[in-house]
Amino acid sequence: MKRWLSAAVLGMFLSGGVQAAIDTYQFRDQAERDRYQQLTKELRCPKCQNQDIADSNAPIAADLRREIFRMLGEGRSNQQIVDFMVDRYGDFVRYKPALNARTWLLWFGPGLLLVGGFAVLAVIVRRRRVSAPAAGADLSPAERARLATLLEKDLPHD
């Protein structure tokens, strides 16, 4: 019984730290809460790099969530908030960066690499077809006759 009691007390102490990491913001209405959740899901944590700020426990992600909440309270639009984050952290902070002169390679690079790979493959195949001589084209008539007799001859079986 003492073990169960000590495990329960220890569990309560350890769970207190976990509960402290949860953001508790008071929103005016459900629409504002939905906007907050959408924005925190579409922005990437600058420290974690492959996690959105809604799921990240990094201190910078907590700061960004607090900043988004503050800007929502000021009445800023989603686009204004995203623009602020991009101005501050660069296009990297967005999972789907806007198409512009700095991000065109990100958007079209994989397709260009794929097309380039197929072009190189087509050139290699074409060169091999052109350079490969037809079977028996370099043989003299005597060599062809000898080849035919060798191919017709039954080989001994083991």
Image: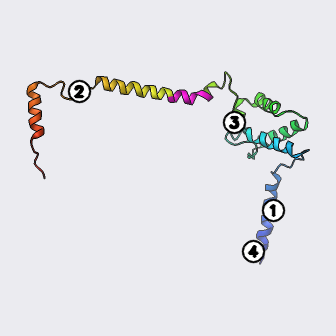
Q: Residues within 10 Å of mark 4 (few under 14, many from 20)?
A: few
Q: Which mark is residue 134?
A: 2
- Residue 64 lies, in percent from the top left, at 80, 39
Contact, mark 2 vs mark 1 (Cβ under 8 Å): no
Dividing the picture into quadrants, the one containing residue 111 is top right
Q: Magenta segment, which residues? A: 106-114
Of marks 1 and 4, which one's residue comes earlier in the chain? 4
The image quadrant where one finds the N terminus is bottom right
Q: Which mark is residue 95?
A: 3
Residue 16 sits in which quadrant?
bottom right
Q: Nearer the viewer, mark 3 or mark 2?
A: 2
Q: Which residue is mark 1?
A: 13
Toward the top, the furthest residue is 101
User: Which residue in the rendered view is the most extreme toward the bottom?
Assistant: 1
Question: Is disc 4 in contact with disc 3, using a CB cutoff of under 8 Å?
Answer: no
The residue drawn where x is 34% and y is 23% is: 127
Residue at (71% x, 34% y) in the render: 94
Closest to the observer, 28 or 43 = 28
Q: Reading the chain from its start, which is encountered first: label 3 or label 2?
A: 3
- Marked residue nearer the N-terminal end (3 or 1): 1
Looking at the picture, which amino acid does disc 3 mark?
A: Tyr
How dense is the environment of label 1, judged by Cα within 10 Å: few (below 14), some, or many (20 and up)?
few
Q: What residue is at 42 percent from the left and 28 percent from the top?
A: 121
Q: Are marks 3 and 1 in contact (CB under 8 Å)?
A: no
User: Which mark, residue 99?
Assistant: none
Residue 3 circle label? 4
Mark 4 or mark 3: whose residue is earlier in sequence: 4
Query: How far apart, in angstroms, are the residues tagged by discs 3 and 2?
Result: 54 Å
Left or right of 24 in this view: 121: left
